[in-house]
Each structure stands twice: as C-alpha cells, then as structure tokens.
C-alpha cells in the first residue's frame, strides 16, 4: 500500500480549542468544553507541537502560543510540593496540590525538549531553569511511563550539552527502567513488565532505545527494540493495518484483547518509538511500522474511518467499529499534529539514508566515484 501524503500544517482547530491560559482539555464536538478546564499534560504536549511545527512555519508563527504554554508550566510548578499541579479550572485556579506521576514526567519531557530546541533564548533559559527546579522529583518516580517520559526529557537536555545534575537523574531513571524490565523474557509471548497492556505502550520501548543509544548499552537497546518489535507485531493486522489495543477493556495477559475505542495516543506513541528505532538501526521495517500507524489516522484502519481532520488539524477522540468519537479534544488533536511532524522528519531521514546507501554502493573507477 502506498504511503499516505504528509498532511499540510493546519492550526485551525488547535487555535479554536486554546483559551487564555492554554489549550482546553476537552471538546464538545469541535467546540472547547471549558467546564473541564485545562491541564499540564496537554499544555506540555502543546509546547512540543509548537517546537515541531516551527521548522515548517517559522518561529514567529508559533512563538506566542509557545510562550503561553511556558508561562502555564511556570505557574503550575508548586515548589512546596516539589512538582507540578495538573488540573486548572476555567478561571485559572488550580484544583490539586500536585498532579500524577505521569503529569510530572510529561512536564519534564516537554521542558527538556524546549530547553534544548527552543530557538528563543529567553524561552530556552526559562525551560532549563524550570526543568532544573523540577528535576529532583524525577528521583521519586515509580510509574513506568512517568519514568520513561522523564528519561526522554533528560535525554533531550543532554543532547544540548553536558549537565551533571541531569546526567545523575538520567542515570537513575535508566536504572529504574532497566529494573522495570528485569526478569522479563523478551523472546517470550508476553515481553511486557505489566499484566495488562493499557495506554501509550510504545513510550516504554522508546525510552529504552533512547537510553541504550545515549549510554551505548547494546543490551538495553536490544530490549527496547525487541519489545517494540513485539508491540508492532501484535498491533498489525493480517492486512498490514495498525490495530492498537482498544481502551474499552485493554488487554490482560491470557485474556481477551479489547478491539475498539482505539486511541490516537497509541498511534503516535508507536510512530515516535519507530522513528527513534529507525535512527538507531536504519531498518526500513520501522519506517513501515510508523507509516502504518500514520495511515491509521487517515482511514487505513479496521473500521475504514478517517480519524483526523486534515483540513483543520483536529482529531477525533477515538475509533469504534462503526463510528469515530465526534469530540476532538486536546490530547487527540496534539497526537495527530505530533504524528504529522514526526513522519515528516522520519521520511526526510529515510530519504537521506537511501541516498547515502546508493552513493556508497556506486562503483569507483580510478579512485573517483561515478
């Protein structure tokens, strides 16, 4: 099946569901549902989307919303609790003392990316300072997904240069993630550290592969790639379609796999993990897996329904057998926009790899490559 075209960038729906503090958490159809307010998880993801899209749009097109998201994260940090609030009502009041572990991990990942990639010096400095203030909390994380997110945040910071505190936190998180997978038979029929497959599963092998790359630990890399291979295999239909585990019951080991209420976050998590796996291995199988997950948004799925709205940049909240969820909330929309830009980068890298291999395999006559 031919690759689906890369969608043009549209921020119409993103702007539609963004309020004075940041992106609204939920939507009623395509309209923001302000009753549920905003949350750190989504604002952190929105900041990352701005940083991804600025490569195509230019910084000025996304600078205002990136600064707003950064201000939100600064306001969300609760130094007394040593972490971030998560939920905020429509009037701007925080509804909790400290958010979940996943909230802390996602905030650290977004801040790490901003600290190393934001083109604006002030925003980059703010992100690095806040990342440093929140970093001690990373040592207390025990949730595998929170550990993986925080690890990826540290990896992003270290990509911009050495930092002793970040290096210590990174090493600690790598050790924790290694222990999560210790004793797992990665060649068995359930190479997974939990008794159930739930949400954002590919985040874990993504972090393992990134950790193996930075530490040059081939064993860690092998575990990450093997687990990702398994996730790809069990989520690929006989027709080659991406078929994520449904959130309507998940999949317990030895039980019946939930087929429907498939979520956009699963497709994007797989794309992100496969993109890193391709960077590390240059194996085209990972490019194909990412393409299948991307095509899921565009109708190449078991229901044959389009999940993303290419024209507006919005995305439906889930996929059932006969319909899509009509609501287009923050997480789903941000997952679609992340998927588009990740695929844009992956295709560019794949093209460069093919060009290099063609050049390297060309015959050489009298010391001059033809």
Image (cartoon, rainbow, N blue to C red):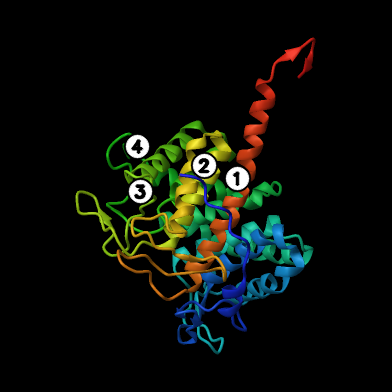
Q: Residue furthest front?
A: 2
Disc 4 is placed on an element classified as loop
Q: Is residue 123 left or right of residue 10?
A: right
First-in-chain label (2 vs 1)? 2
| Residue with the mark numbered 2 | 287
Q: Is residue 349 left or right of residue 303?
A: right
CB under 8 Å between discs 2 and 4: no
Quadrant that contains the C terminus: top right
| Residue with the mark numbered 4 | 186
Which quarter of the picture shows residue 191? top left
Disc 3 is placed on an element classified as loop
CB under 8 Å between discs 4 and 1: no
| Residue with the mark numbered 3 | 235
Image coordinates for residue 183, horizontal then vertical, percent: 32, 39
Give the crowd class for mark 3: few <14, some 14-19, many >=20 residues within 10 Å. some
Q: Is residue 156 left or right of residue 88?
A: right
Q: CA distance from mark 3 to mark 1?
A: 22 Å
Disc 2 is placed on an element classified as helix
Q: Nearer the viewer, mark 2 or mark 4?
A: 2
Disc 1 is placed on an element classified as helix
Image coordinates for residue 270, horizontal then vertical, percent: 46, 50
Q: Nearer the viewer, residue 313 or 103?
A: 313
| Residue in the picture at 58% in, 73% down | 14
First-in-chain label (4 vs 1)? 4
| Residue in the picture at 59% in, 46% down | 346
First-in-chain label (2 vs 4)? 4
Give the crowd class for mark 1: few <14, some 14-19, many >=20 residues within 10 Å. some
Q: CA distance from mark 2 to mark 4?
A: 22 Å
């Amino acid at each position: 099946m031919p690759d689906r075209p890369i969608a043009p960038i549209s921020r119409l729906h993103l702007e539609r569901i963004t309020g004075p503090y940041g992106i609204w958490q939920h939507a009623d159809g395509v309209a923001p549902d302000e009753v549920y307010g905003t949350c750190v998880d989504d604002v952190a993801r929105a900041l990352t989307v701005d940083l991804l899209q600025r490569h195509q749009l230019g910084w000025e097109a996304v600078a205002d919303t990136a600064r707003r998201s950064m201000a939100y994260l600064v306001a969300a940090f609760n130094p007394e609790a040593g972490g971030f609030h998560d939920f905020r009502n429509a009037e701007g009041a925080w509804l909790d003392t400290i958010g979940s572990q996943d909230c802390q991990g996602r905030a650290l990942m977004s801040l790490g990316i901003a600290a190393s990639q934001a083109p604006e010096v002030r925003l980059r400095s703010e992100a690095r300072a806040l990342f440093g203030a929140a970093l001690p909390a990373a040592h207390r994380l025990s949730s595998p997904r929170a550990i993986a997110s925080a690890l990826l945040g540290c990896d992003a910071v270290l990509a911009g240069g050495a930092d002793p505190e970040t290096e210590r936190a990174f090493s600690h998180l790598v050790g924790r993630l290694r222990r999560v997978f210790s004793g797992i038979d990665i060649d068995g029929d359930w190479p997974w550290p939990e008794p159930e497959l739930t949400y954002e599963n590919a985040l874990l092998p993504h972090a393992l592969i990134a950790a193996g790359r930075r530490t040059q630990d081939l064993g860690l890399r092998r575990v990450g790639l093997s687990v990702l291979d398994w996730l790809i295999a069990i989520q690929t239909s006989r027709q080659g379609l991406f078929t994520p585990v449904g959130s309507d019951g998940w999949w317990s080991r030895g039980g019946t796999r939930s087929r429907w209420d498939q979520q956009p976050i699963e497709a994007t998590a797989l794309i992100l993990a496969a993109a890193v796996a391709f960077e590390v291995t240059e194996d085209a199988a990972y490019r194909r897996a990412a393409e299948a997950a991307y095509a899921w948004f565009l109708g190449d799925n078991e229901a044959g329904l389009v999940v993303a709205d290419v024209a507006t940049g919005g995305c439906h909240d889930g996929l059932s057998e006969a319909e899509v969820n009509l609501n287009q909330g923050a997480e789903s929309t941000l997952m679609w926009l992340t998927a588009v830009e990740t695929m844009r980068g992956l295709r560019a890298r794949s093209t460069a790899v093919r060009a290099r291999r063609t050049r390297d395999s060309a015959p050489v006559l009298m010391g001059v490559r033809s």
